[in-house]
Image (cartoon, grey):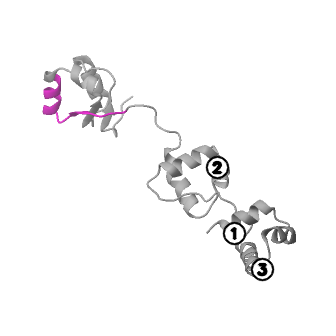
């Protein structure tokens, strides 16, 4: 049960003389022991000094909370979004929830935003509506001719 390659370990209990001996036997190449602040405060200063003389450093390291399941996918999601994939296709390809895709993109440093607004009437149809109005037709006539709701015609004409 000896691990020759490990040079750093994280402990969750305060060090005792027997625990130090056990760690030195298990990890002969040990250089760093990390622990939380509360554990560090419970370790005797003599033990810390003794370990320093053996070139083993005791450091405070925070490992709070559960690591996110999607941290590794964040860069992949952002890259795919910037390449032009829709949020729905990203969610399907990476097998993650759609809301998680939106969250990862929104919480990133990237300025990217999904364009979910879908225009029912393209620019050509909008220009045609303006041309018909400029030609002297009333909105009701335009609505009947193009088979578009009157409310939509007014919306397009009044939107600058």
- Which of the pair 41/16 is nearer the observer? 41
Mark 3 → mark 2, Cα distance in angstroms? 49 Å
Mark 1 → mark 3, Cα distance in angstroms? 13 Å
Of badges 1 and 3, the one in the foreground is 3
- Which of the pair 23/110 is nearer the observer? 110
Label 3 residue SS: loop
Q: Residues within 10 Å of mark 3 (few under 14, many from 20)?
A: few
Residue occupying image coordinates x 79% and y 62%: 150
Quadrant occupied by the N terminus: top left
Q: Which residue is mark 3?
A: 136
- Location of residue 144 in the rendering, given as x and y in whole percent from the top left corner: 86, 68
Label 1 residue SS: helix
Of badges 2 and 1, the one in the foreground is 1
Residue 137 horizontal side relative to residue 67, left or right: right
Q: Is residue 136 above or below residue 11?
A: below
Mark 2 → mark 1, Cα distance in angstroms? 37 Å
Magenta stretch?
A: 47-63
Q: Which residue is mark 1?
A: 157
Q: Which of the labelled discs sits on residue 91, or is there none? A: 2
Per the image, is 56 magenta?
Answer: yes
Of badges 3 and 2, the one in the foreground is 3
Q: Earlier in the sequence, mark 1 or mark 3?
A: 3
């Amino acid at each position: 049960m000896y691990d020759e390659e490990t040079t750093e370990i994280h402990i969750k209990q305060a060090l005792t003389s027997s625990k130090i001996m056990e760690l030195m036997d298990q990890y002969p190449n040990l250089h760093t022991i990390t622990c939380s602040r509360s554990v560090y405060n419970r370790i005797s200063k003599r033990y810390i000094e003794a370990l320093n003389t053996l070139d083993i450093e005791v450091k405070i390291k925070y490992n709070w909370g559960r690591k996110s399941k999607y941290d590794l996918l964040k860069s992949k999601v952002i890259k795919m979004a910037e390449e032009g994939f829709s949020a729905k296709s990203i969610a399907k390809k990476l097998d993650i929830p759609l809301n998680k895709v939106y969250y990862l993109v929104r919480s990133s440093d990237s300025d990217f935003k999904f364009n979910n607004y879908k225009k029912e009437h393209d620019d050509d149809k909008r220009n045609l509506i303006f041309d018909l109005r400029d030609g002297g037709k009333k909105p009701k006539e335009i609505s009947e001719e193009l088979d578009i709701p009157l409310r939509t015609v007014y919306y397009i004409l009044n939107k600058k």
